Amino acid sequence: MKTLTTLFISLIFFLPIKEKKLNMGMYYYLIPETETECTNDFPSGLSYFFEQVGGYDEYATVSQLENELDIDLSLFQKTFTDDESMFKEMEEYGQIKNAEKEFKKHKEETRIKTDSLLELLIEFKKKLDKSKDFAGKIKFNNNQTIPENIRILCPPEIEYYRNGEFIKDLNKLILTLECYKKDGVEYLRLGYA
C-alpha cells in the first residue's frame, strides 16, 4: 500500500499539467434554467476570486476591489446547491423543520436574472478598466507595508490579477452570459460544489 501511495503522489507532482488551476477544491459553475448550447463553465480563477469571502472576509480580494471600485458583487455569494439530501440531514438534526420547503425556498432565493448578472459583470469590467493598476491596490499577505495583524488576514499574492488572466476570465464569463441571453436563458443559478 505504501508503494502505491508513493507512486500516486509521484504521479501527481511529476505529470505534466496543461493548465494551472487556481482553485483546487470547491468551484463555481453555471446552471441555466432552460436548455442551451452555451457552456456552463465558470473560469476557475474567477471561482477562486469569488469564493475567498468565506475565508478572508473583508480582506478577500473581491471585498477589497468592491471597496476600491465602489461596486457590490455580493450577487456572486448567492450560490445554489442541488444536494437535497443536505436539507434532509439538516431536518434530521433539527436545524430546519421542513427539508422540502426549505429546499424550494433555497432554489427560489438563488435564482438570478441572466441580465442582472451580465450587467453587473460589464459594470465591474468598466470600473476595472478605469482603475489604474487595480492589482497594485490589493493587499496581499506578503506586503510588508501592512501591519502584521492585518497582513495575516490577507490572501496570498498570485500573478492572476497582474498578468491579464483575470480580465480574460471576466471576458469569457461575459461572453457566456451573452450567449445565454441570445439563447433565451432568462434565469440561472450559480452552482458551487
Image: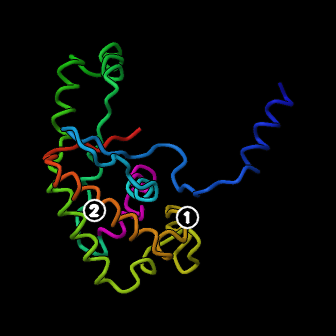
Give the residue number, with chain letter if any, for mark 1: 156
Question: Mark 1 vs mark 2: which is more N-terminal?
Answer: 1
Q: Is residue 54 left or right of residue 96?
A: right
Give the residue number, with chain letter if any, for mark 2: 174
Q: Is residue 43 left or right of residue 21?
A: left
The part of the image, by quadrant, that contains residue 92 is top left
Q: Is residue 59 magenta?
A: yes
The part of the image, by quadrant, that contains residue 192 is top left
The location of residue 18, given as percent across then percent down, is: 61, 56
Q: Amino acid at mark 2?
A: Ile
Give the magenta-colored segment's residue range.
51-66
Q: Nearer the viewer, residue 110 or 20?
A: 20
Query: Is residue 122 depicted above or below 3 in this figure?
Result: below
Q: Nearer the viewer, residue 137 or 38?
A: 38
Q: Is residue 178 magenta?
A: no
The quarter of the rendered structure image containing the C terminus is: top left
Q: Residue at x 28, y 62 (%)?
A: 174
The location of residue 151, given as percent across then percent down, is: 53, 68
The quarter of the rendered structure image containing the N terminus is: top right
Q: Amino acid at mark 1?
A: Pro
Q: Is residue 52 left or right of residue 187?
A: right
Q: Nearer the viewer, residue 182 or 8?
A: 182
Label 2 secondary element: helix
Label 1 secondary element: loop
Query: Is residue 172 depicted above or below 29 in this figure?
Result: below
